[in-house]
Amino acid sequence: MSSFEQLKAQALELGLSGADVAQYVLQQQNGEREERAREREETLAKLQAEKEVQLAQISASKKPASQIVEAMNGACECVASTRPGNQGTRKLVVPADCRRIVLQVAHESPLAGHFSHRKTEDKHRYLVPTFFALRELPSDRTGFFAFDLLYGRSVRGPFTVLKDLWEDRQLKADDRNSLQYVIEMRNKLQECAQLAAQQADKCLAPRTLYNMTSSLPPPAGLRPSIIRCDTSNFGLGAVLLQDIDGTPHPVAFASRKLLDREPRYATTEKEALAIIFGVKKFDFYLRGKEFLLETDHKPLVHLQSSRCSNDRVMRWALQLQNYPYRVVHIAGRDNVGADLLSRCPGK
């Protein structure tokens, strides 16, 4: 079937434009569809006619069973079967001079299920037109047809696989190779599907964080603010968040390197220094309203009480008295933003 672009080019060559082009393309496509449908009908009618002729020939060539009886009358005998698994049964032995007649009549009888050389001739006669007819059938689900695949070009390929799956019998070496290919391909596809599902889960896990950080919302004065601070051996990190519909969204980020003397501070002192840095950095957003101070260092929960015995930490606690805040301890795995900023600090 000609493509839309080819039909459009033909219409333009004919000098058509506007709605005339669309009408020309539609007429050409409808004509091609009707022609293909007519070819399919002719092919199917031809196959049906050949089938009827063959059935008529088979019916005319049938030989009476009396010929077989006369040929084998008194010449056959029954002996005990020696085949493993068939002990105790008897089989009919046909003399050598009568076997040709038996095979000839059996092959020419449609009740026998096969027609000897005629079966091969019929296969070549009907196989190619049948494949052509199947390929001509429209497929809405896929862009290809079953007979274009691996086993579509082999008549007995899928039936051999089904025989092994249904009957659980041993296959020949050639068939086993084909079946092994299918099994390996199925396993590879399953592994690919599992890997794709795992990767999809990994991509969806931080999706909420990506949605929050894709565009920073402007700070709103009425929303509760949250400060998360953390420190490392390299720098300080702080994140300002605001609660929007029950979910904390980041508003601003800040970080800096530790000064030459600050790496020698104790862990509690460095964590308190990160809090002072974050509060001073976001002073414009925090002054005059209560905010939540979240830290993953549990000793700083008592920052507002008199239990702190460290002089440096006590001085920083006095500086924070100008702000209405509450200190809350969170797990280290929840303090990802501030921890990342402290490990990759700015200037």
Image (cartoon, rainbow, N blue to C red):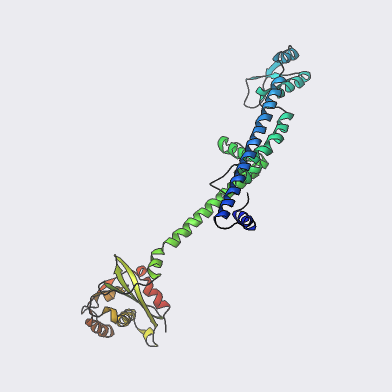
Instruction: Give coordinates of residue 97: x percent, y percent.
Output: 79, 19
In this orientation, which residue lies closer to the viewer: 295 or 27?
A: 27
Q: In the visual, does 71 lie left or right of 255? A: right
| Residue 156 in sight here | no
Residue 199 vertical placement versus 234 (above, below): above
Q: Residue at the spot x=27%, y=83% of the render?
A: 313
Q: In the visual, does 205 lie left or right of 240? A: right
Residue 332 vertical placement versus 232 (above, below): above
Residue placed furthest toward the bottom: 260
Instruction: Give coordinates of residue 296: x percent, y percent.
Output: 32, 72
Residue placed furthest toward the right: 97
| Residue 200 in sight here | yes
Residue 338 vertical placement versus 10 (above, below): below
Instruction: Give coordinates of residue 247: x percent, y percent.
Output: 31, 66
Residue placed furthest toward the front: 15
Q: Residue at the spot x=48%, y=59% of the render?
A: 199
Quadrant of residue 332 within the rendered picture: bottom left
Quadrant of residue 177 within the rendered picture: top right
Quadrant of residue 36 within the rendered picture: top right
Quadrant of the image containing the C terminus:
bottom left
Instruction: Give coordinates of residue 162: x percent, y percent.
Output: 58, 38
Q: Residue at the spot x=71%, y=34% of the render?
A: 125
In this orientation, which residue lies closer to the viewer: 213 or 346?
A: 213
Q: In the visual, does 237 lie left or right of 286? A: right
